[in-house]
Image: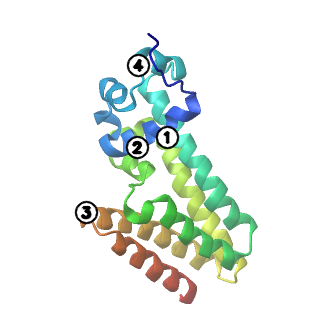
Amino acid sequence: MSALRTLYERADVVPLLAEIFRELGFEGATLSRITERTGIGKGSLYHFFPGGKEEMAAAVLAEVDTWFEQFVYEPLRRDDPAEAIAAMWKNADAYFRSGGRICLVGAFALDETRERFAATINGYFRRWIDALAGALVRSGRPASEATAAAENAVLGIQGALVLSRALDDKALFKRALDQMAKRLITS
């Protein structure tokens, strides 16, 4: 009798880990819980991630970073500013599933995990702010105002995520994004 077995590649495992870290946090995502939720044995996990849970979290953060680089930061740096900023709001809504998915980088920034991944966490937020500020400057906003506006936009997205999750109201996240988009254009 042959047993059916799912074969995984490292790239297949990272999204599974991301959702586990989102749900349980870094500390709560014990190796036992990870194996239970993924169905992947400890030996296989260590094969993919010899550095253990810390390497798993680093791989997840790298995947998040790659997504934001491709769909948020680079378009803000390269594309027509108005189009790139509109796409940023749309892509943030899609990525965060209309407020139904927490920002893993933001969550890691709030607990003991921050020190382990400080450079990655700082880079994620700094590059978002800088890319958005650059697009705002290219659209005619003075540099001194652009940075503050970009900080407020990223802050607003993070706050909207927290509030929409706390109130279990995905519509709140979308409303907040729409309101922030209007303010960013008119201010």
- Furthest residue to the front? 1
Judged left or right of residue 175, residue 6 is: right
Nearer to us: label 1 or label 3: 1
Number of residue marks: 4
Q: Tell me which residue sits at (38%, 40%) in the image.
A: 21
Measure the alpha-carbon separation of dots 4 and 1: 16 Å
Say which residue label 2 marks.
Answer: 19
The circle on residue 163 is none
Q: Taking 34 as reference, is 97 above or below it?
A: below
Q: Quadrant of the N terminus?
A: top left
Say which residue label 4 marks.
Answer: 41
Measure the alpha-carbon separation of dots 3 and 4: 34 Å
Measure the alpha-carbon separation of dots 3 and 2: 18 Å
Amino acid on which disc 4 is placed: Gly
Residue 36, x across and y down, in percent: 32, 27
Residue 82, x across and y down, in percent: 67, 79
**Which element carries disc 2, helix, strand or loop?**
helix
Say which residue label 3 marks.
Answer: 166
Measure the alpha-carbon separation of dots 2 and 4: 17 Å
Dot 4 or dot 1, earlier in sequence: 1
Measure the alpha-carbon separation of dots 1 and 3: 24 Å
Q: Taking 99 as reference, is 110 above or below it?
A: above
Dot 3 or dot 4, earlier in sequence: 4
Amino acid on which disc 1 is placed: Pro
Judged left or right of residue 21, residue 167 is: left
Q: Are marks 1 and 2 in contact (CB under 8 Å)?
A: yes
Q: Are marks 2 and 4 in contact (CB under 8 Å)?
A: no
